[in-house]
Amino acid sequence: MQRFEKWTETYIQLLKADQENALEPKDLETFALAAYLTGRDSESFHILERAHQGYLHGKKTAQAVRCAFWLGLILMNAGERARSGGWMARGERLLSEQAPDCAEKAFFLVPAALGALSAGHAANAQKLFEQVAKTGEQFDDPDLIALGRLGYGQALIQQGDVAKGIKLLDETMITVETEEVFPVIKGIVYCAVIETCRKVWDLRRAQEWTSALTRWCADMVPFRGQCLVRRAEIIQFHGDWSNAMEEIKDACELLTRTPGKPAAGEAYYRKAELHRLQGDFEEAEDCFHEAAKRGRKPQPGLALLRLAQGQRDSAETSIKNTLQETIDKNSRAELLPAVVSIMIAVKQTGEASGATKELSAIANEFDASYLYAMSSYCQGTVFLAEGNIQVALEHLQKALKFWNTLDLPYESARTRELRGLAYWELNDKDNSDVELAAAKWVFEQLKAMPDLERVNQFLKKKPDHTTYGLTLRELQVLRRVVSGKTNKSIAGELFISERTVDRHVSNIFNKLGLSSRVEATAFVLKNKILDNEF
C-alpha cells in the first residue's frame, strides 16, 4: 500500500473515531498528521491545536510545547509567519514551566538558527544548530538530531566547507532513514538536502536523494510538489524530456493550489526551460513570467530565450545586469555559462573569457563534476571563437568525458556539435560530419528543435548511424543491460518503472533480433553499437 493510501486510511479511521468519542491528545496528533500529509492543511492545524489544549489540560506541558513547535514549523513552511511566530512564542512561554534542562528548549533554537542562515550569518547559525544536535544526542531525540545536523551541514556549506557539509548531510539522511523521525521533519530534511546538493552542483547526490524522497513520500501532498520539481529536472538532465514535461506540469498544478507554495516559481522556471529548449518560445516566455510572478528570477533562461529569438542586445543587457546583481557563487555558477554563450554571440570574447575563468575557479572550489564539465565546455567555446582550434578540441574532449560519465545526453550533444564545428574549421569534413551527425541524432530524439535547426546549417548529409533503429532511451537501457544491471536497478537510475524497462528490453531484442542479455552483450561488442556516447 502506498504511504498516501495509508495516511488517507488513517485519517478516515480517526475522523470516524473522533466523531463518536473525542480523541485523546496523542491520537489527535496522529489525526492532525494524517490530515496534513493528505493535503488537509487547515483541518490539520485545527486538530493539532486541540491536541495542544488537551495536553495542557492534562498538565503534560512538554507534549503541549512540542505541539506548539510543530504548529509553528508547519505554519512557517506554509508562509504564515505571524501565526507561526505566535505558536513559537507560546511554546517558549510554556517552557518556563519545564525543568531548566529539557529537550524541548532546543526546538526553539531552530527558528533563530534558520533566520541566521537565511541572513547569511552562517557562523552564528552553525553554533545554534550544533547546540540543537548535541541536545538531541543528550536526550536521544532523533528529531533534534536530524534538524541540528541538517542545519549544521548547510551552515558549513554556506561558509565554503562543501565537503564537510555534504558529509554531514549524508549522515543526516541516514538518521531520517533509520530512526523514528517525525514525518514532517523527515520531509523537510529530504527537501532541504536535495536543494542543497543541487545548489552546490552535486547532481549525483541530488538524484540519489530525490529517488529516496520519491519512494518515501509517494503522493504525500506537502512534499510531492518539491519532489516533482527535482525529479523533472533530473529526468530532463538524463534525456527524457517528454516525461520531464509531464512531471513538471503535475508540479505546477499541485504547487499552485490555494494557498500556493514557494516552490511553484521553480516549477514554472523548469517548465519554461523545457519549452525553450524545444523551441516553444511563446510558451517559454509565459512560463518565465509566471516563475517571476511567483518569486523565481527568470534568468539565465529568459536571456537565452532572447538570444534564440535573435534579440541579442536584450539578451546581453539582461544577463549582464543579472550577473552584476548576483553575489552568491552558487547562483553565479548558474549564470556564467549563459554569459559565455551570449558574449560569444555578440562578439565580446574578452568578457566570455573572463566568465569562463570565474566558472573554472568556482568549479575548483566546489569540486563538482558538472561544473568541471561546464567549465571545460565554456573554455572550448571561447577558444573556438578565438580561432585556437586545437586547444578548443582538447577542452571539448575533456568536457565530453565528464558529460558521458554523468550520463547527460543533451550536454554531450552540444559538445559534439562544437567539436564538429572545430573540425569544420580544420577542413576535416569526415570528422566534422561524424560529430555533427551524432549531435543531430540526439537533438532529434529530444525534439530540441532550435539545436536541430542550427546543426542542420552545417550538416550537408546524414551519415548512417549504427544504432539499428534504437531510440535514445533504448540505447540508455541497452548500455545498462550489457553492464550487468538488473531491470530494477535500471528503473531506479532512469526514473522509470520496471514495467517500462521490460518493454524497452523487449523492443531492443526485437529490433536487434536477439533473445537474451548474453546475446545483447555479444552483439554490442561485435557491432560497436555503444562506442558513441549518447
Image: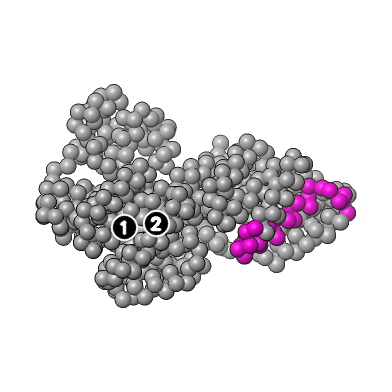
Q: Disc 1 to disc 2, how far (Cα)?
A: 9 Å
**Residue situated in front as seen by the camera: 515 or 62:** 62
Q: What residue is shown with label 2?
A: 360
Say few, some or many: other residues with alpha carbon within 10 Å of mark 2 (under 14 / 14 to 19 / 20 or more): many
Residue segment shown in magenta: 97-123
Q: Residue at position x 45%, y 44% from top?
A: 204
Q: What SS does tag 1 mark?
A: helix
Percent x, y of residue 43: 68, 56
Q: Is residue 336 magenta?
A: no
Lateral position of residue 442 relative to residue 88, left or right: left
Q: Is residue 24 above or below residue 299?
A: above
Q: Dot 1: within a 10 Å radius of its alpha carbon, few (fewer than 14), some, or many (20 or more) residues?
A: many
For residue 459, above or below residue 531: below
Q: Which residue corresponds to mark 1?
A: 379
Query: Which disc number belongs to residue 221?
Result: none
What colouring does the structure picture have? one colour
Q: Nearer the viewer, residue 357 or 94?
A: 357
Considering the image in quadrants, where does the N terminus appear? Answer: top right
Sequence-first disc among 1 and 2: 2
Q: Is residue 197 above or below residue 333?
A: above
Residue 446: x, y in percent?
A: 29, 51
What's the residue type where badge 1 is placed? Gln
What residue is rendered at 34% in x and 47% in y?
403
